[in-house]
Image (cartoon, grey):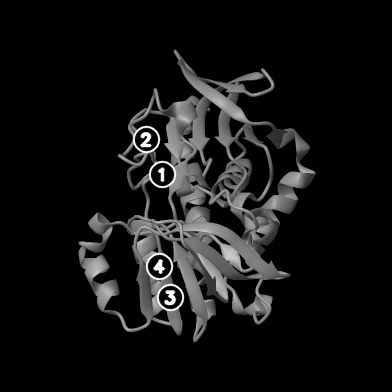
Amino acid sequence: MYDLIVIGGGPAGLTATIYALRKRLNVLMISRDLGGKTNYHLSLPWVEDYQVIRGLEVVNKFKSELEYLKFARQMDTVEHIERLPDGFEVQTKTGAKFSTRAVILATGTRQRRLSVPGEKEFIMRGLCYSALSYAPLFIDRKTVVIGDGDLALRSAAELATVASHVHLVGPGPDALRSALGQKLQHAKNVTILEGYSAAEVKGNGFANAIVVMSPDGKEMELQADGTFVELALVPNSQMVAHLVELDEQGRIKVDCYARTSVPGLFAAGDVTNSYAEQVLVAVGDGAKASLSAYDYLLPML
């Protein structure tokens, strides 16, 4: 039986695993990759790497350590977790089963995609999924935000503080009645295309235009230096949905010690209800979860 199993190899999972190794815990990290969201970063023709704060130095250091420590990792996907009298059983897609005294879930989220022509070709090349991360790069640039909910409105509002113009594609009347929706309707550099949808992403090396469709089927092409897809984030919490308490968005509820509603089961990073989906926030969450798990395990060691 392991002392601790960390599920997920992104910033939170990598950090948690390294901290656990340094506490001399018998730990196993299970993930389909190493690096998670840091394997994808936005490329823009006018931006150099030094202008972006990504936290990659920390994440890559931990990633390189785990690439070397093969005994501490299992490249697989966890599908289900069950409670045992003395811990948990972790079941993977390949049929493997592992028992452990404690678990840290750091599985992150997945972004809803547009599923239109050109999207796959230009992902992270002018087309991205986080205005929160990249808005400062678009000073005096033309941008497009696609989405119909609060996430899209927040992204458009943030971009409007720096961009020369923002097209907000797709919001409905309910979203526009909110305080943020009212503000955007009065912003001079924001054009709202209510009820529109994305039809195609176009570009030449980098995405530079988005074809949108009106509710009555008419198409229009918008020129943009950057397009942000802000539909929704779906937490990868399904493997513990029957065990722990989730919020209305399906994120795992945690306290300030990264503890879930189940003793011995901790969570960190974007899969939780903690604030802001950022690499450096996830790194901190992973460290906190590992230290908290160590405190939980100490009487058993």
Look at the image and tell me whether residue 268 can be seen: no
Q: Amino acid at mark 2?
A: Thr
Q: Amino acid at mark 1?
A: Thr
3 and 4 marks in contact (CB < 8 Å): yes
Look at the image and tell me whether residue 62 can be seen: yes
Instruction: Report which residue position mark 2 lands on.
Output: 260
Q: Position of residue 196 (x, y in %)?
A: 41, 59
Marks 1/3: CA–CA distance? 30 Å
Instruction: Report which residue position mark 1 lands on.
Output: 272
Q: Which residue lies at the image location 39% right of the left edge and 69% below the top edge? A: 156
Question: Label 3: few (<14), some or many (≥20) within 10 Å?
Answer: many
Under circle 2, the secondary element is: loop
Under circle 1, the secondary element is: loop
| Quadrant location, the N terminus | top right
Q: Nearer the viewer, mark 2 or mark 1?
A: 1
Q: Amino acid at mark 3?
A: Val
Q: Position of residue 164 (x, y in %)?
A: 45, 85
Question: Label 4: few (<14), some or many (≥20) within 10 Å?
Answer: many
Marks 3/4: CA–CA distance? 6 Å
Does 214 sit above or below residue 234? below
Under circle 4, the secondary element is: strand
Query: With 10 as the anchor, is 235 left or right in this view?
Result: left
Does 148 sit above or below residue 162? above
Q: Amino acid at mark 4?
A: Leu
Quarter residue 39 falls in: bottom right
Quarter residue 60 falls in: bottom right
Instruction: Report which residue position mark 4 lands on.
Output: 168
Question: Label 2: few (<14), some or many (≥20) within 10 Å?
Answer: many
Under circle 3, the secondary element is: strand
Q: Which mark is residue 166?
A: 3
Pick out the residue farthest to the top. 85
2 and 4 marks in contact (CB < 8 Å): no
